[in-house]
Amino acid sequence: MPENKESFWPSAKDRKAQAAIKIKELRERIDRWARLYYVHDAPEVPDAEYDRAFQQLQALEAEFPELVTPDSPTQRVLGEVKQGLEPVRHSVPMLSIRTETDTGPGAALAFDARVRRELGFSEADPPVEYVAEPKFDGLAMNLRYEQGRLVLAATRGDGEVGENVTHTIRTIRQIPLLLPTDVPPLLEVRGEVFMARADFEALNERQRALGGKTFMNPRNAAAGAVRQLDARIAAQRPLRFFAYGTGAVTPPEEGGPDFGTHYALLQTLKKWGFPVSEHVKLAQVASELVAYHAAMGALRDQLPYDIDGVVYKVNRLDWQRRLGFVTREPRWAVAHKYPPQEVVTRVEGIDVQVGRTGKLTPVARLEPVLVGGVVVTNATLHNLFELRRKKVRVGDQVIVRRAGDVIPEVVGVVPQPPTAVPARPRYVPNFRMPRQCPVCGSAVVREKGEADHRCTGGLFCPAQRKQALLHFAQRRAMDIEGLGEKLVDQLVDGGIVQTVADLYRLDLPTLANLDRMGEKSARNLLEALEKSKQSSLPRFLFALGIRHVGEATAKDLARHFGSLDAIMNASVEQLCEVPDVGPVVAHSIHMFFAQPHNREVIAQLRACGITWPEGPPASAHTAGAQPLAGKTVVLTGTLPTLSREAAKELLEAAGAKVSGSVSKKTDYVIAGADPGSKLSKAQELGVPVLDEAGLRALLAARAE
Ligand code: IVH
């Protein structure tokens, strides 16, 4: 034992000095991250990293309260007003929630204990009721209604002053602009604006195809859309909303509502037309919160949107008032987080994978890391341009995102502070796309205007063949149970199966001879193959793996044409008549069926006994009650109030066919701002051109 502890342990004074330095550093870091996150919608680190620094700062300030200053990030809600957006003062501040990251049952029970203590309850008192809700990962919004009309939508900002974003919020169809007559004269509804995961993926996919900037996550994409100065851009980004509370409301003394409980409040908001999550649950006792946390955690990946935790709230509003607030957080609510969907890890290498359509995808090999509760070792870098834009190199620290059943992806590199030990060696060669397919050696090409590199080997390439077989066999296609990756590898590498038709020629001795295949599994596979022969036209079409033909298009094609032969013999123009099929997709379908090789495989599949019910084409049995039936309309440019989808829906509901290109057969072109070449084409061909008002007049006139 050392005699003089002082020489080994820093004195209280030293510790305080050290804490002061650390606090300063943490505040600077948090302020920088918060500015990037809230003001620029461009976070530099994952939320979990931010939370960690924040909690570290909170702990140090708790230990040295004399070092707390009013400008510390712990003392205010972060966020500033973006240039160009009008600042608005909230009539009731928008606060934050205390966050617990503990994943065990502890957090819910500790919260309940704290609430009971603060309410002055003893064990003899009855349990406190709570409401449990998902913690949506979007951005907080205050919607102000006066006399039932939406007059203002504002972001949280710093909690006191937010930004006026009424113009973009008005484009969200889920948000009512006008409320029923029984609402109080003043009603502020609070909730979260967010983007569904599929919409986010589609948006990034579009951006990638255009070679544009992609968004880190749905939250970011939503924040960017809401804070657009130009509402037309926001209108093209599908946003959603869930209500979870209120701000200023006409008080009961002045004839306003007395909701009594938070749960009743949410039910009333629902009745008034606000979306409220179906996952909001009433918990009679705190133990139900523990069960809720586990249940939502299990559901998390299947939800169509991101949640980063759950929120528990005291149900009785009078008790909420009694509990009140501490600095920036209410005492009556707590957020209980889930493992982060974005984490930092190191790139150990960059491989190239070959997909079903020959697409070469650079994939980062990672130092294994837990993301949203799953170990991730690989993450996609999408394509060469994306990789270059993100400046990812071997040795880098990167942010990896995994959410839902989407393939994990590298969203960006974590900038290293200049003082840090360099994470990668001084010289790392830039990644290059191979010129030859790493699997079959065929030439790799990139078509003009496309971001993707492709192997030209087609079905000669074992990688493409394997993927084609797996695609064919998947549940939503031919549903051949038991035909997995390992088996397909053996079948292709052993030269046993060349085409999908060969699958139906497999026999028991061949199968039973394969590695890890007993007679039993061989029999099962043969049975599954037999069963798969009774198919449906949409499934069969999808199974063929025609480029651009997903499940939805396959269904549309089947409905429109009724039979495979009709589709196989359709011209590009005829294919374009199918809803949602444009020239690119039509061309791809036409090319597929023009290849003798593909026709041969289809003939063989039919000869093997694959069948499906066929019917007459849809046009033969649709009734002619629709006013625009038989008319072909083309949309171009941005309309002032209608989104492209909405205009299309209206037109289709009226029986019109909305086409992607202008021809002599086009009846009308509807043009908005910044129209494309379609407008000049229409003028050239003398096709009538209408604006949005004209479109509405057309729909109205025809509806009479
Ligand atoms: S209640 C005073 N409920 O979490 C409490 N917030 O740190 C006000 N959030 O940015 C918030 N889901 O936008 C509440 N079900 C929910 C929520 C939720 C997400 C967000 C909110 C705010 C943050 C609070």
Image (cartoon, rainbow, N blue to C red):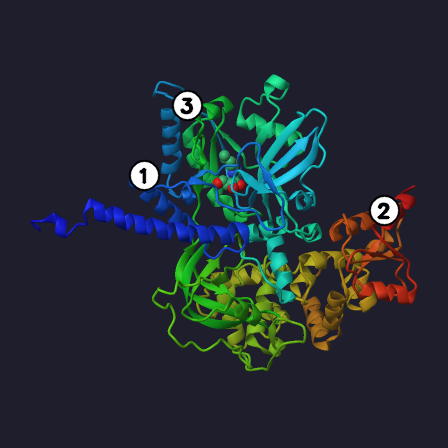
Q: CA distance from mark 2 to mark 1?
A: 64 Å
Query: What amino acid type is highlighted by mark number 2?
Result: Arg
The structure residue drawn at horizontal position 61% and vertical position 33%, both measured from the top left corner, is: 189
Query: What amino acid type is highlighted by mark number 3?
Result: Pro
As drawn, the label of residue 65 is 1
Please name the residue that numbered disc 3 is placed on: 127
Q: If you read the primary sequence from the N terminus, does the residue marked by circle 3 or circle 1 appear first? A: 1
Is residue 662 visible to us here? Answer: no
The structure residue drawn at horizontal position 60% and vertical position 54%, both measured from the top left corner, is: 200
Q: CA distance from mark 3 to mark 1?
A: 34 Å
Please name the residue that numbered disc 2 is placed on: 696
Side of 556 relative to 67 (left or right): right
Q: If you read the primary sequence from the N terminus, does the residue marked by circle 3 or circle 2 appear first? A: 3
Q: Position of residue 234 (x, y in %)?
A: 67, 51
Secondary structure under the numbered disc 2 in the rendered image: helix
Q: If you read the primary sequence from the N terminus, does the residue marked by circle 2 or circle 1 appear first? A: 1
